[in-house]
Each structure stands twice: as C-alpha cells, then as structure tokens.
Image: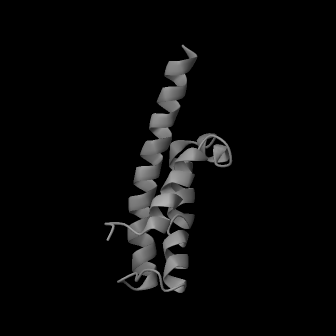
C-alpha cells in the first residue's frame, strides 16, 4: 500500500513536467494572480477523484475547496517562485 494514491503521484509528476510548457501561462502571471487561479481551480482534481469514488473528501465541499485550495496554492506558488529563480540563474 502506497502512502498516496498512484493517480495523485502521476498527477503531480505531470504537473511538474508541464510547468514550462502547457502551464506556461501561470508563470507569466504575477505570483498573487497565480495563487488566486490555483485557489479557484486546484482542488478540482481531488473533487473529480471523489466523484469517481477514488478518494473521500472528508469535509463538506466548500470547506474542502477552501482548505485544499489555500494549501495547494501556497505550494504551487512556491514552485513557481523557485522555477522563476532557476530560470534567472540559468540565464546569467
């Protein structure tokens, strides 16, 4: 038994691999704008998993969306920030 569902591991891997290509529009936003986009849309993958009975949200939908949205957005904004710093370092 894995600590995380494999679909979630693959989802994160796909996210990180697509950061500079299909998700490049997020890196062009200001960090606070990217945070808001993630806050609104990031929990959707978990919600979809719950709709397919793969996971249980454990909270009412609005609480889950708010909690995971903030958590996910903070981590993803940090990933974007690190990605920006790496690009600046490479360009030097």
When asked about the image quadrant of residue 9, the answer is bottom left
Q: Is residue 37 left or right of residue 85?
A: right
In-front residue for pair 23/74: 23
Q: Is residue 2 left or right of residue 42?
A: left
Q: Residue at the location (49% across, 28% down)? A: 86
Task: Name the residue furthest front.
Answer: 1
Q: Position of residue 15 (x, y in %)?
A: 55, 52
Q: Quadrant of the N terminus?
A: bottom left
Q: How is the image coloured?
A: one colour
Relative to 25, is 41 above or below? Answer: below
Relative to 89, is 64 above or below? Answer: below
In-front residue for pair 12/73: 12
Q: Position of residue 72 (x, y in %)?
A: 43, 59
Q: Residue at the location (52% across, 32% down)? A: 84
Q: Quadrant of the C terminus?
A: top right
In-front residue for pair 43/55: 55
Q: Residue at the location (46% across, 47% down)? A: 77
Q: Residue at the location (51% across, 59% down)? A: 10
Q: Position of residue 89 (x, y in %)?
A: 49, 20
């Amino acid at each position: 038994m894995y600590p995380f569902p494999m679909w979630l591991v693959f989802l994160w891997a796909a996210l990180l691999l697509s950061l500079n290509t299909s998700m490049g529009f997020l890196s062009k936003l200001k960090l606070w704008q990217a945070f808001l986009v993630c806050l609104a849309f990031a929990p959707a993958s978990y919600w979809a998993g719950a709709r397919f009975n793969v996971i249980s949200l454990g909270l009412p939908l609005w609480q889950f969306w708010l909690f995971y949205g903030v958590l996910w957005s903070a981590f993803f904004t940090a990933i974007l920030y690190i990605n920006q710093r790496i690009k600046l370092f490479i360009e030097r």
